[in-house]
Amino acid sequence: MSYQVGYLGPKGTFTKMAVDGFFKDYESRSYETIPECMDAVENGEVDAGVVPLENAIEGTVHLTIDYLIHQVSLPIIGEIIVPIKQHLLVHPDFDGDLGDIDIIYSHSHAIAQCHQFIHKNMKDSRISYTSSTGQAAQLISEKGGNIAAIGNELAAGEYGLKIFKQEIHDYPNNHTRFAVIQKEKKRLPMQDFQPQNYKTTIMVTLPRDYAGALHQVLSAFSWRKMNLSKIESRPMKTGLGNYFFIIDVDQTYDQVLFPGVQAELEALGCSMKVLGTYPSFLLSEEIIKNICDHKS
């Protein structure tokens, strides 16, 4: 059986763009939600899954992190960073102005990334949230009329839409990290690409009522000169005040530093779990252009 990759669909999402860029020679299957995609990997329906992890403007996709922690046991085996350019998409028959658009459809993160544009130019337009930018584009294609979607160039090509306004996102340096998750140990097809760097993501749970515990946790990395690119707290869902921390370390897992950190943390009463050690890839503008040209 060929290698199959699940992704947050439908076609035209940024997740599909990541899949097309790094898994173009492999079969892909879309899922309507992030949990459905992750369940498909857990159940063996697909060999790997690609789900959004973090956006530079909107931050962590909490649904992805929480589902990884509480619902499935799937290691992160790769990361794809995709430059995000949000466009205002309309049906090709639409010939009005911005003020004529009654409803804007898109994913909540995409809407938030374009908040200032909407606030300044489309105050009277109603916002309707969809499960993905691809679903929003598909809806515009099917319904037509005085409605618009926020999505990417790939979605415009997939659904035959017109890009009414280009690059309406509020900040130029907009990127999204996508996690590649896999249950069985198989060769990762992305290994044919040159990684940008390597990361290890860990989960640390602190003991309750321990003054200075977080400071001591960070010190375990600091004196070993291990660079942390991200640290974020999430609720344990076991009661108020109970949190765990997600920490990204800018290096691959080794058999010296990380076991030393874990032993030090356990001595403090903390627990540590490795969620993945993996290469990080950047989807280049050239690859994105080739993907979009192929769909247009």
Image (cartoon, rainbow, N blue to C red):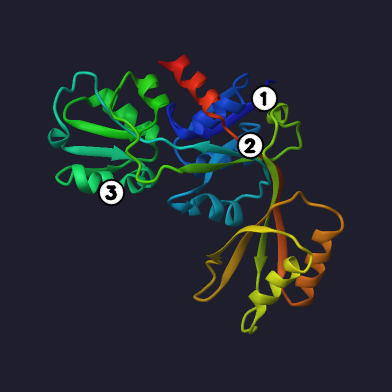
The residue identified by callout 2 is 281
Inspect the image, locate mark 1, and give the three-letter code of the amino acid beneath it. Answer: Tyr
In the displayed structure, 24 sits above or below 245; it is above
Check disc 2: other Cα within 10 Å, few if <14, some if 14-19, many if 20+: many
In the displayed structure, 30 sits above or below 220; it is above
Callout 1 touching callout 2 (CB < 8 Å): no
Mark 3 secondary-structure assignment: helix
Q: Nearer the viewer, residue 16 or 291?
A: 291
Mark 1 secondary-structure assignment: loop
Q: Please identify the quarter of the rendering in which residue 208 is found.
A: bottom right
Instruction: Give me the C-alpha separation between circle 1 and circle 3.
Output: 42 Å
- Name the N-terminal-most of marks 1 and 3: 1
Check disc 3: other Cα within 10 Å, few if <14, some if 14-19, many if 20+: some
- Name the N-terminal-most of marks 2 and 3: 3
Instruction: Give me the C-alpha separation between circle 1 and circle 2.
Output: 19 Å
Identify the residue at image location x=19%, y=42%. 121
Check disc 1: other Cα within 10 Å, few if <14, some if 14-19, many if 20+: some
Inspect the image, locate mark 2, and give the three-letter code of the amino acid beneath it. Answer: Phe
In the displayed structure, 161 sits above or below 13; it is above
Q: Quadrant of the C terminus?
A: top left
The residue identified by callout 1 is 3
User: Would residue 233 be found to the left or right of residue 205 on screen?
Assistant: left
From where the camera sits, is residue 93 visible? yes
Callout 2 touching callout 3 (CB < 8 Å): no
User: Would residue 90 be found to the left or right of residue 20 on screen?
Assistant: left
Inspect the image, locate mark 3, and give the three-letter code of the amino acid beneath it. Answer: Gln
